[in-house]
Amino acid sequence: MAPVQLRSTPRRTRLLLVAVICIFFVWLHPSSNLFGLDPHDIRFLNFGLRPTPDVLRYVDPLIGTANGGHVFPGATLPYGMAKAVADTQSPAENAAGFVSDNNPVLGFSHMHDSGTGGHPSLGNFPLFVHPGCPDDDFKQCKFHLMERPTDRVNGSVIASPGYFSINLTNTVRAEMTATQHAVLYRFGFNGSATVDVATTADEPVISGVPYSPLVLVDLSDLMNSRSAGGIQVYPDDGRIIGEGKYAPSFGTGSYNAFFCADFQGATIRRTGTFQGDKAEEEPKFLDGSKPEFYVPSGSAGAWIQFEPPQDNTLLARVGVSFMSVDQACENAEREIPDWSFDRIERAARRAWHEKLSAIEVDATGVSEELLTTFWSGLYRSLLSPQNYTGENPLWNSTEPYYDSFYCIWDSFRAQHPLLTIIDPVAQTEMVRALIDIYRHEGKLPDCRMSFCKGYTQGGSNADVVIADAYIKHLREDINWTTAYEAVVSDAEVEPPNWGVEGRGNLVSWHSLGYIPWDDTDRNGTGPASRTISRGVEYAYDDFCISQLASALGHPADAAKYARRGGNWRNYWNPDQRDIHLDADGDVTQSHFVGFPQPRLVNGSFRYHRTRSCSPVQDMHSCYYDTSLDTYEGSPWLYSFFVPQDMASLITLMGGRDAFVERLRYFHESGIAYMGNEQAFLPTFQFHYAGRPGLSSYFVREYIPSLFNTSVNGLPGNDDCAMGAFSALAMMGFFPVAGQDVYLLTTPYFPEVRLRATVGGKSGWAVIKVHGFDPEGRRKYIQRARLDGREYTRNWITHDFFRNGGLLEFWVSEEEGKWGSEEGDVPPSYSPEMGRVDDELFARVDEEGRGRGLTAGSGRGT
Ligand SMILES: *[C@@H]1O[C@H](CO)[C@@H](O)[C@H](O)[C@H]1NC(C)=O
Ligand SMILES: *[C@@H]1O[C@H](CO)[C@@H](O)[C@H](O)[C@H]1NC(C)=O
Ligand SMILES: *[C@@H]1O[C@H](CO)[C@@H](O)[C@H](O)[C@H]1NC(C)=O
Ligand SMILES: *[C@@H]1O[C@H](CO)[C@@H](O)[C@H](O)[C@H]1NC(C)=O
Ligand SMILES: *[C@@H]1O[C@H](CO)[C@@H](O)[C@H](O)[C@H]1NC(C)=O
Ligand SMILES: *[C@@H]1O[C@H](CO)[C@@H](O)[C@H](O)[C@H]1NC(C)=O
Ligand SMILES: *[C@@H]1O[C@H](CO)[C@@H](O)[C@H](O)[C@H]1NC(C)=O
Ligand SMILES: *[C@@H]1O[C@H](CO)[C@@H](O)[C@H](O)[C@H]1NC(C)=O
Ligand SMILES: *[C@@H]1O[C@H](CO)[C@@H](O)[C@H](O)[C@H]1NC(C)=O
């Protein structure tokens, strides 16, 4: 219509009007930044939506950078490969490079993982910057990674999406921002002709150091794993290129990485290379020809010394690649052609804002603290897996490639289901990448980092991710024939090394229905421990495969895997008592009876302490090298891992009341450890006993007391999963991964809006709380309505997020009856017991153990 009207106005006015309208639309466009406005500030022009505050204001990347959170707080894009931060010399804590402690800074590096356990990850090719060298003699500068560490200026760290900066006591300030495969650093200098340089508290201050910045690039990585490499500096233009071969931080094999660094802002004075702490102007090229070069912990690299930069800032642009030096240079040149720090930072903020705009909350009355916990958790959920598409040296493929699945054991429960809702495009690419890994490596990964196979902690949980994707309609572009082949391979074919892929003890799993403690596994090798935790996970994985089989039209398979999905029962020793030591060290027992226990080939149970590997007993005895039968958690914890058949579990535990008492006890006795992902679902499993209010209650016990905004505000490694847990819980729903089920609890906001993935209806899935109480006292849902109709189920399906809709809650201070009827609880799938299983239980009966409902009846003994 507009052009027609324009025709009747004079030409000059017409042009003017066109110009004004163009500017208006450019200004409206989310990727424009005219007049320096952030696009989200003008959202009110998006008619119909309420104004959204600048949510990036509530992202604090430093949460979880102390006390084991291992969060990466540096500059990056969503799923970005380039991740820049200052690396600190913090033993056992610097898995992601930076730690909020008092340890000195080793350098600034360009690739990291976030929230992981294992060894420190990546951190290859750190830069370090000296403002000048004593006596203007470059040989007196510190080069070695054990010599050069320098304290940070207390309180100088600034971190926000796409930006990180820190001041060192040597007077250098380092700022950094990132694109997908490159980093732009801006180093700021004091500007005086001479400066007083402090390194660490135990070293004397060096006075009067002449201003002439020296930048070095070290071929080291964070875990000192380099086993080969080379570096070259070009004295004319100052470009430094290099490569190295390194080890993955929680896996086998090795990977190669490449970088390309350029500098701008100052005139080059001299260049050279260094080995250890010894720097020379010649040669300009280093490789394995000098023996000490290969010592893994030995620093080696190249350096450039500059004249004082004119405006006291020096830019360094570093491209990275896993393909070649050439590709590293191309990445940098393509993504940062203009060297504009502000433009790159703005683009990064825009990318983050766009991702987070899938969610809106009404923040009325909600504290800054809770908003920050919420948005920061969402932000962290988008750090990894990393999009390495185009950077995979292992095979040529038109499929996407993602890496840093670190590990799926951690991420399948909350993070991937969250991405499925807020970024289905990325989640689809991740699933395709997993399937492509199967295509080329022969198995799906459970853990994968830096192009290497990582250690499998439990089951083959990629099976859950794949089933979840199908159930939630991420169908486009995914080859379901190959996907199904991949999960069936996990279930049927034992790989030679099941420590890094697939499953172990499969012959027994198929014939006996459990992993015997004394199994003789001739088909493959792997750590022959964790028989209980692997077993309950294999059972759930098989259940998920059965769902996929059924959907894809393989009824016989569906029945077979549904039966195996019942194998969790084979671990259940109905007589096992909960023996433990009390506070005085005396042997005692709770009144709970019946726990999963290890089993021998002949069917007998073996005793395993019910509380081992929990905060109250032997907390640290169940890591990957454990000889025990559970992984990073107790039999108590794993007794609840039956998401496929909670109804049978509840019966086995003695009925609803006994189950609720047991689950409460688990949370209140100190046995539950929220720092690991297996504890997420048990926070919500009260739903299955018709007590959704207790799930709401326990969510509020944990958030914010264990998930908050301090640098130690996470109870364990983030794994990009802790943030997903807190974000989901605060929005009022938690996924049962692998099923079309979300458990409903009271949100922390009066209203939450999620952009519907398909559109439909309003285009948004809206959760609205009537009678919302910012203090959280009205934490119980009394009544619910879905799209205007009364809703008594305590769970919803994915349709809500796909199509949009309106879910309304009325909340109160008292736990009511809502969601408590038999028909209100989420589904349970009870397969008919397999033949072998029946035999086993018969044998148990013969032994006089009985298979009765023991938890209730055993009370008080
Ligand atoms: C920073 O503060 C800590 C104490 O909080 C202190 O130990 C450390 O020396 C300080 N560092 C500097 C560079 O002042
Ligand atoms: C860090 O350095 C910048 C630039 O020199 C300066 O403006 C800022 O105040 C410093 N921060 C601290 C905490 O010293
Ligand atoms: C530069 O450093 C000197 C001491 O080394 C200090 O006195 C001076 O204030 C600093 N100048 C700036 C601009 O920070
Ligand atoms: C991928 O294709 C390129 C170009 O044909 C070839 O040079 C390269 O070796 C291939 N890479 C692999 C891992 O097959
Ligand atoms: C992943 O990277 C590829 C190649 O750069 C790009 O085409 C794709 O859009 C990226 N995916 C996401 C979700 O950003
Ligand atoms: C899916 O992969 C199979 C091989 O596993 C192939 O035969 C089939 O053509 C693929 N389907 C599509 C739609 O690409
Ligand atoms: C175990 O190895 C045997 C002999 O090679 C083979 O026939 C069987 O299929 C394998 N079983 C599994 C579950 O991988
Ligand atoms: C199974 O073997 C163990 C250890 O050899 C033995 O103590 C137990 O009695 C056996 N159980 C059965 C049912 O044979
Ligand atoms: C924040 O969380 C941490 C880790 O879970 C916890 O130790 C700390 O007590 C919490 N802080 C507050 C103020 O709740």
Image (cartoon, rainbow, N blue to C red):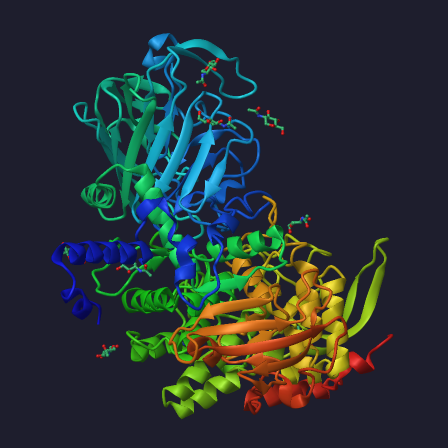
Q: Quadrant of ligand 6?
A: bottom left
- Name the image quarter holding residue 752: bottom right
- Name the image quarter holding residue 437: bottom left
Is 839 situated left or right of 84 in this image?
A: right
Q: Is residue 292 visible?
A: no
Query: Does 742 appear above or below 451?
Result: below
Q: Residue at x 55, y 38 (%)?
A: 100
Q: Quadrant of the N terminus?
A: bottom left
Q: Residue at x 47, y 90 (%)?
A: 559
- Residue 383 location (% of width, % of height): 43, 53
- Residue 396 location (% of width, % of height): 20, 60
- Residue 333 location (% of width, % of height): 20, 41
Is 748 situated left or right of 663 in this image?
A: left
Q: Quadrant of the C terminus?
A: bottom right
Is 393 situated left or right of 55 in this image?
A: left
- Residue 524 location (% of width, % of height): 42, 67
